[in-house]
């Protein structure tokens, strides 16, 4: 399946390590390609939406108070981790009052940023702190992006899909238009729309509506997929979900979006693509080593540093590397600890912790061609 360059994970990892796979597990300190930062909501609330497929909804959802330490760590790292991704296993990053300061710190040292958000707070934060204007002003890298989990093409469907009582859809679209307008349709950050298809939002009318909106606004890409089973579940339960939902619906959903995908050029705006369910199939998770540590490490919302974003919850405390710290030596020790050739991913799988699609691609490629 054709994917944009930013979604070619093995190629991205090879570029990061200088195309020398002999560096993997050789004992040296190699910072990962990206640092994922799960800011702890507003300290009281994790997220303002209630998506039924939220990957972290069945996980323990503790919130810490570590933002100052995290900022000090970014200053100490001085740009050695190229990409900072602001998202959350169970938190909405735009709830956090420190987000803009984090983004500014990211850019001070020449790093790129990614933001994964439901988009509902864009307009409010623009009015309060010039968030959108500042975001566009500091964006300077082709890898800077803003990803909106929209999952609907019409207001009434968005309200139902997101478990809301009021219409946020129009406000989100207003925010996306604001970003596109200020950046003058073609500069940075890239505007990405994520669309998880379900029985309520997959009609031809709905898909035509969202694609038309994105074309009109000047969005860069739309990624369609089926929601994965939530994290923390036994793999047999995940297989049941695959049988009952993913395999049952995939052809029907694909038939709706297929004409848009097959009729486009590689430079189309928005670039429309489909991520099939097998990209996170638990039956693909049959490797004995994990090299994802060279791609990512995560500051968890609870105040701990985790091996990866998929395990960034107290539910998977065995994947904690240490407390979030501003002390660079301690952080470096955690990076080295994460590069453990003896770590068997089966430890994660037995607890219901699954690899994301990036880790699956990297670990399967490593197993099949380099081990």
Image (tube, rainbow, N blue to C red):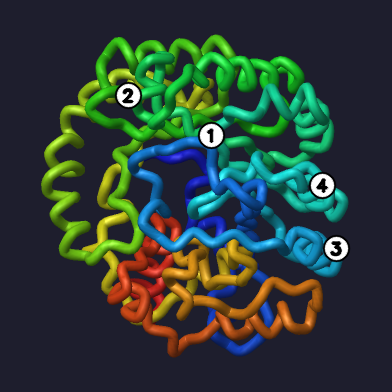
Q: Position of residue 226 (x, y in %)?
A: 29, 39
Residue with the mark numbered 4: 101
Tell me if residue 65 can be seen.
yes
Could you give the CA–CA distance between mark 3 and mark 1, rounded to whole angstroms? 28 Å
Quick check: 61 left or right of 106? left
The answer for how far apart the CA atoms under marks 4 and 3 are is 12 Å
- Point out which mark residue 262 bears: 2
Work out whether residue 85 can be spotted.
Answer: no
- Who comes first in sequence, dot 4 or dot 2? 4
- Dot placed on the residue nearer the N-terminal end, 3 or 1: 3
Q: Is residue 42 above or below residue 15?
A: above
Task: Give the mark toward the camera: 4 or 3.
Answer: 4
Quarter occupied by residue 62: bottom right
Q: Residue at coordinates 83% horizontally, 52% vertically from top-left?
A: 105
Identify the disc placed on residue 75. 3
Report crowding for label 4: few under 14, some 14 to 19, many 20 or more residues within 10 A (C-alpha).
few
For the residues bearing labels 4 and 2, Cβ distance under 8 angstroms: no
SS class, disc 3: helix
Q: CA distance from mark 4 to mark 2?
A: 41 Å
């Amino acid at each position: 399946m054709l994917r944009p360059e930013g979604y070619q994970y093995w190629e991205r990892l090879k570029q990061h390590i200088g195309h020398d796979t002999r560096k993997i597990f050789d004992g040296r300190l190699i910072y990962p390609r990206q640092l994922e930062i799960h800011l702890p909501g507003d300290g009281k609330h994790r997220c303002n939406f209630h998506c039924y497929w939220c990957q972290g909804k069945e996980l323990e959802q503790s919130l810490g108070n570590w933002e100052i330490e995290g900022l000090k760590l970014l200053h100490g790292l001085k740009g050695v981790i190229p990409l900072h991704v602001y998202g959350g296993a169970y938190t909405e990053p735009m709830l956090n009052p420190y987000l803009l300061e984090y983004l500014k710190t990211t850019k001070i040292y020449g790093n790129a940023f990614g933001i994964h958000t439901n988009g509902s707070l864009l307009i409010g934060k623009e009015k309060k702190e010039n968030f959108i204007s500042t975001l566009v002003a500091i964006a300077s890298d082709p890898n800077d992006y803003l990803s909106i989990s929209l999952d609907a093409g019409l207001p009434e469907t968005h309200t139902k899909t997101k478990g809301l009582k009021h219409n946020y859809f129009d406000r989100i679209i207003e925010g996306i238009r604001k970003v596109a307008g200020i950046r003058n349709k073609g500069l940075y950050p890239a505007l990405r729309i994520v669309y998880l298809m379900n029985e309520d939002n997959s009609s031809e009318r709905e898909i035509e509506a969202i694609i038309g909106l994105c074309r009109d606004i000047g969005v860069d890409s739309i990624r369609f997929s089926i929601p994965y089973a939530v994290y923390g579940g036994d793999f047999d339960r995940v297989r049941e979900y695959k049988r009952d939902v993913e395999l049952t619906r995939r052809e029907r959903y694909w038939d709706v979006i297929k004409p848009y995908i097959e009729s486009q050029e590689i430079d189309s705006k928005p670039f429309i693509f489909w991520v099939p369910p097998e990209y996170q199939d638990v039956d693909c998770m049959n490797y004995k080593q994990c090299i994802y540590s060279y791609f990512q490490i995560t500051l968890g919302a609870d105040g701990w540093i985790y091996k990866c974003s998929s395990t960034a919850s107290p539910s998977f405390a065995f994947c904690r590397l240490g407390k979030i710290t501003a002390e660079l030596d301690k952080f470096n020790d955690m990076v080295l600890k994460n590069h453990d050739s003896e770590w068997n991913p089966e430890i994660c799988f037995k607890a219901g912790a699954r690899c994301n699609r990036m880790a699956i691609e990297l670990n399967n490629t490593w197993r099949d061609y380099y081990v």
